[in-house]
Image (tube, helix red, strand yellow):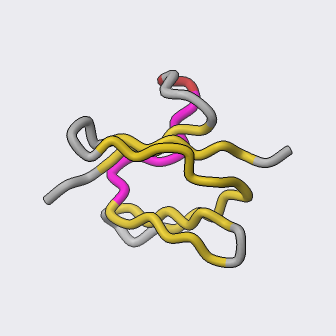
Amino acid sequence: MCLSTVYANNEDAASILMSNVTRIEIKDNLVVLTDLLERKIEIDGVLLSVDLLQNKAVVKERT
């Protein structure tokens, strides 16, 4: 099973939005993250990058 960590704006440890992410969806201009326990958060932003080898993604939040 591949679980990822999603960061806000950069890959700094202080900017972690969610760990153990199992799903990333784009819905109505929102990035929807779902973790292993089925918890969801919606971020008003855009998906900048996904590194499948490093199991991380970066979302740029809108201001």
Viewer-closest of 19 and 26 = 26
Q: Quadrant of the N terminus?
A: bottom left
Rendered location of residue 18, percent (x, y):
47, 48
Rendered location of residue 44, percent (x, y):
73, 58
> Could you tell me how many numbered marks the image carries?
0
In this picture, which residue range is highlighted in magenta? 15-21
Residue shown at 19%/55% (left/top)? 2
Left or right position of 1 against 56: left
Rendered location of residue 25, percent (x, y):
50, 70
Left or right position of 53 against 51: left
Relative to 54, does residue 23 appear above or below in the rendering?
below
When asked about the image quadrant of residue 42, the answer is: bottom right
Q: Does the magenta stretch include residue 25?
A: no
Residue shown at 44%/66% (left/top)? 34
Magenta span dominant secondary structure: strand
Left or right position of 38 against 41: left
Residue shown at 38%/66% (left/top)? 23
Residue shown at 70%/77% (left/top)? 28
Q: Point out the residue furthest to the bottom here.
A: 28
Relative to 16, does residue 42 appear above or below in the rendering?
below
Left or right position of 13 against 63: left
Q: Quadrant of the C terminus?
A: top right
Q: Point out the residue furthest to the left here.
A: 1
